[in-house]
Amino acid sequence: MKPYYEIDFSAVMCSFQIKINDVELISMSIDGQTRSDFPVNHLILESGKQTIEVKGFPMSGQTQLHEEAYIRYRVNVYDVSSGDYTFIKQFDEYFTLKPDKKIPFVGHKSTFEADVPYKLEAWQKGKDLKDVKFDVKEKLINKYKQMIKLINRGNYDTFIKQYQKRENNNATAMYLSNAQAEARMAGVVSDMKNGFKAQDLPADVFLEYSAYGKLVSLRSSDLMSALRLENTETDEELVLPITFYLPEGKDEFEII
């Protein structure tokens, strides 16, 4: 069996974030409502207890939560070993409480047990970045600038090499064939070759730690990844989610 875990969620009138095992799955601002399903296998490192945390904040440009803001979620499990999605079971469904004007967010935490046929090597052996003796933000900004130069100078092979571990883990967790995994990476590079250029980092970037202090990324004021690609001819923008860790025994950030 190839268990495939999805989170089925709805969000109403809020900016929201969903984390699995303290790593962001999605963040978005909704002026209205949305409902979607997202796979979470890539954030399940191995079998056992998994944590979910959802938070809802005021919508972009607002200072208070809308009185109707809420988030609903549950985890569904499928078997994809046959190539189809065969429903196995669903876990409990949860709702955030009604907003309180004294509290600037709504949230909920829960756990579920996962049983997967793999174990990912990710950030487990990374350093706790809140305990290091250097300026994490300064070092990370320099790393982002290096990535921006690689993209805009067309050094795609070097970019792929640095991004590869993340994609290898994704391929393992999502049960992708080698051809499917290569196609995913080729799609990102294709966009870069077809008019998308990496943008300079905005001045208001801030650090976001995750994975219990072992991962870090740069975010913009809209809470999204600070690594953006823009096509000026089509007025399209791509947001490239990217997180870094510092492996034990090393002094350079790596993508994971």
Image (spheres, grey):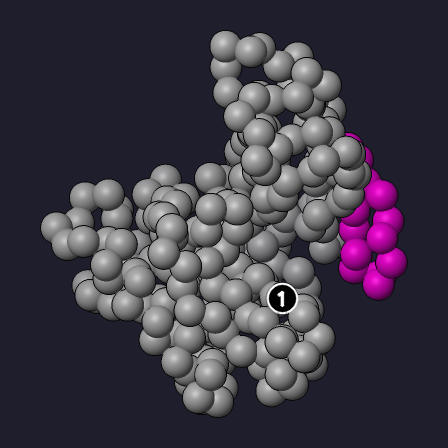
Seen as rendered, the residue at the extreme left is: 133
Residue 206: where, in percent of width, then height?
Answer: 36, 48
Compared to residue 198, the image places residue 22 above or below, namely: above
Give x and y (percent) for residue 163: 47, 73
Viewer can see residue 197: yes
Residue 253: quadrant of the picture: bottom left
Quadrant of the image containing the C terminus: bottom left
Q: Looking at this view, is 33 or 55 the one in front?
A: 33
Q: What amino acid is labelled 1 in the image?
A: Glu
Q: Residue at x 61, y 66 (%)?
A: 238
What is the span of residues highlighted in magenta in the rendered image? 78-92
Element assignment for label 1: strand
Residue depicted at x 24% and y 54%: 136
Q: Quadrant of residue 142?
A: bottom left
Residue on which disc 1 sits: 237
The reply to whether residue 108 is visible in this rendering is no
Q: Residue at x 21, y 66 (%)?
A: 250
Q: Residues within 10 Å of mark 1 (few under 14, many from 20)?
A: some
Residue 89 forms part of the magenta stretch: yes
**Quarter holding the N terminus?**
bottom right
**Total residue callouts:** 1
The image position of residue 11, as x and y in percent, is: 72, 32
Q: Position of residue 244 (x, y in %)?
A: 38, 59
30 within the magenta span: no
Seen at 68% across and 16% down, the residue is 67
In the rendered view, tell whether residue 83 sits above or below residue 93.
below
Q: Left or right: 60 with respect to 6?
A: left
Camera-side residue of 241 and 39? 241
